[in-house]
Image: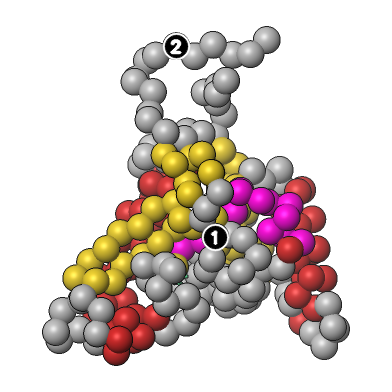
Amino acid sequence: MSTKRTDALRVAVLVSGRGSNLQAIIDAIEAGMVQAKIVAVISNKKEALALERARRHGLSALFVDPKPYAGRPDSREAYDHELLEVLLQHNVELVLLAGYMKIVTNILVDAFSNRMMNIHPSLLPSFPGLDVQKKAIEWGCKLAGCTVHFVTEGVDEGPIILQAAIPILDDDTPDTLADRILEQEHKIYPRAVQLFAEGRLRIEDRRVLIEAGRPEGESVISPS
Ligand code: GRF
């Protein structure tokens, strides 16, 4: 039986760069559209604009330095162990990758199985990886878009939660296309977080089914 939670979902956002998706999620939370609380914004890049955005909103902005682990054969796993500790200390329930430019290892994937999301600027499974707007144009695609998915071990391979599609215009460049895709990213990422917060995402194999919302005011019986 699902129960409606009364406290806000505890979210951590992992970032590396400009943080416009982080900003969209912060704005959606502040506007009351998303019932979540960002308990930590964590970056592997000290100078990430995303950290500055977090600070501006009074959020905990943490730089976790990957350098001490560089050169070790298990450098990525060791780094993720440190991240995991931080996430556990903050009692994080959902991890959001938002322009996080580091491949996460099983250390995090297993600990946050079905509780870690990523946003990717293509209509997966087309164009995983980098430079995807350029690839979509060069391939001659007529549609592009973005995908929010759960994170699994394979990069950009996890179950798809939400997608948004837009047309590719004849005069699009990778930059103009990226800008229009980004507008969609800023809509679907907060929406996916809210669906998770409402407990409405059900995973069946590779499919994520979105359960109907409860009508406003309907009472919910808690299990005793
Ligand atoms: C976005 O295009 C996102 O889809 C991709 O990285 C970019 C991050 O942008 N994973 P921002 O840092 O959220 O502005």
> Does 118 sit above or below residue 180?
above
Residue type, label 2: Ser
Disc 1 to disc 2: CB gap under 8 Å: no
Disc 2 CB within 8 Å of nearest ligand 1 atom: no
Q: Is residue 79 left or right of residue 104?
A: right
- The N terminus lies in quadrant: top right
- Would you call the spot at circle 1 few (<14 residues within 10 Å), some (14-19), or many (20 or more)? many
Q: Determine the CA span between mark 1 and mark 2.
A: 34 Å
Q: Nearer the viewer, residue 117 or 11?
A: 117
Q: Residue at x 62, y 61 (%)?
A: 152
Q: Is residue 138 left or right of residue 171?
A: right
Q: Residue at x 44, y 41 (%)?
A: 209
- List the residue tagged with mark 2: 219
- The C terminus lies in quadrant: top right
On the image, the x and y values in percent for residue 6 come to 54, 24
Looking at the image, in which quadrant does ligand 1 appear? bottom left
Q: Nearer the viewer, residue 27 or 91?
A: 91
- Would you call the spot at circle 2 few (<14 residues within 10 Å), some (14-19), or many (20 or more)? few
Q: Which mark is residue 39?
A: none
Name the outermost residue toward the left: 170
> Does 5 sit above or below residue 184?
above
Q: Which residues are magenta?
A: 107-119
Which quarter of the picture shows residue 121? bottom left
Which quarter of the picture shows residue 72? bottom right
Q: Secondary structure at mark 1?
A: loop
- List the residue tagged with mark 1: 158
Q: Nearer the viewer, residue 141 or 10?
A: 141
On the image, the x and y values in percent for residue 122 come to 38, 71
Q: Residue at x 64, y 73 (%)?
A: 103
On the image, the x and y values in percent for residue 219 come to 44, 11
Q: Residue at x 36, y 85 (%)?
A: 135
Q: Is residue 42 left or right of residue 217?
A: right
